[in-house]
Image (cartoon, rainbow, N blue to C red):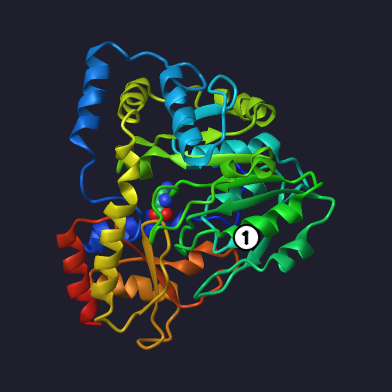
Amino acid sequence: MIPVISKLPQTGTTIFTVMSALAAELGAINLSQGFPDYNCAPELVELVNKAMQNGHNQYAPMPGLMALREQIAIKTEKLYGAVYNPDTEITVTAGGTQAVFTAISAVIHPNDEVIIFEPAYDCYAPAIKLMGGVVKSLELDPPDYRIAWDMVKRLINGKTKMIILNSPHNPTATILRKEDIDELSALVKNQDILILSDEVYEHLIYDNEVHHSMARYPELQQRSFIVSSFGKTFHATGWKMGYCLAPAYLMTEFRKIHQFLVFSVNAPMQHAIAEYLKDENTYLSLPDFFQQKRDYFREGLKNTRFQLLPCAGSYFQSVTYDAITDEKDSDYAIRLTKEIGVASIPVSAFYRKGTDKHVLRFCFAKRQETIDKAVDRLIKV
Ligand code: GLN
């Protein structure tokens, strides 16, 4: 063996892969990794077939197909009032994770500090560390996981380069409110701090709340990379398609990395999505679609000994289990998979220190029969 110095000595395999593999091995109902167990729209599949048959099988342009970037610009302006130039400010990516990695690697230099809120989606910290950046995390607490902005202020100093936000939030299902936006705006005003806003669940927002995209607020928009995901929006996580929005001065740097990381994203799916996006109902129908699943799952869980945490957005429902056991969440998630046959994600995996608040995350982007089966099993706990 040739000696290799690990770049991420502390990092193991992502919890999504671990729990999905365990669920598959044990034949458990997989409510761990977030993905639908039903198919995406047949029209969308048909559009991909058509694109392939029409010969769109060679490289797409490096930043993405223009027709798709134009549709993204139209959607963004319609929803959030922000005008992005498809030529210079929108890039199609191979999913949200690639966009996040590319944005971080484009602007984070050694010793730059990046503020994240934990529990945090697990790809942020490793990307920061790989660039030599320093992760500054603020731990949030259930049940509300509110951001204490005065604590954020204390983390900011001359080295702070970026704040990473995620709304709707994975794994806690909270959303940023207008008060958060006001606090954030006041905090970054006159400071050279960038924002990376992970908005992959932008359309999964419930109870008639609005999604406070950074794109709505010009002073925030001007300093933000915004990441979105067609996998989440169109129930096609396996396509690994997403995009990044950023003002031209940031997008120039983003593309310098993107061109050598992936060059461009697969062409037929870009053709298909460009066409499909023309109908706004394809995404405007999502809150109703998922709210029904959320409510149905929550109703079912009320008959169990799990304690429900709020769910304002995303397709995740978290629960605490203090009435059941005082085991570590990681141990309990494994035992639940083995003994009850329902796989979940232990939320301690989203804290760098493994902070365990006895919270499990379930994904409810599932067919009603899957939810029924899972609830039937969870009732037995
Ligand atoms: N975003 C998905 C989740 O939170 C997982 C994506 C992945 O496994 N990379 O479950």
Neighbourhood count class around disc 1 (C-alpha, 10 Å): few under 14, some 14–19, many 20 upward: some
Mark 1, residue position: 180
Give the residue furthest to the bottom: 323
Residue 259 in the image, given as x and y percentages of width and height: 56, 23
Quadrant where the C terminus is found in the figure = bottom left
In the image, is residue 258 above or below residue 34? Answer: above
Whether residue 79 is visible here, answered yes or no, is yes
Assign a secondary structure to mark 1. Answer: helix
Q: Residue at x 75, y 46 (%)?
A: 193
Front in this rendered view, residue 272 or 260: 272
Give the residue furthest to the top: 55
Front in this rendered view, residue 290 or 163: 290
Quadrant where the N terminus is found in the figure = top right
Q: Residue at x 63, y 29 (%)?
A: 251
Give the residue furthest to the right: 158
Residue 367 in the image, given as x and y percentages of width and height: 19, 56
In the image, is residue 33 above or below residue 238? Answer: below
Q: State yes or no: Cβ of the residue under disc 1 lies below 8 Å from any atom of ligand 1.
A: no
Whether residue 261 is visible here, answered yes or no, is no
Q: What residue type is disc 1 on?
A: Asp
Q: Which of the 4 image quadrants contains residue 271?
A: top left
In the image, is residue 239 above or below residue 57? Answer: below
Q: Is residue 222 left or right of residue 175?
A: right
Q: Is residue 115 left or right of residue 358?
A: right
Residue 241 in the image, given as x and y percentages of width and height: 40, 34
Residue 334 in the image, given as x and y percentages of width and height: 34, 70
Q: Residue at x 81, y 46 (%)?
A: 190
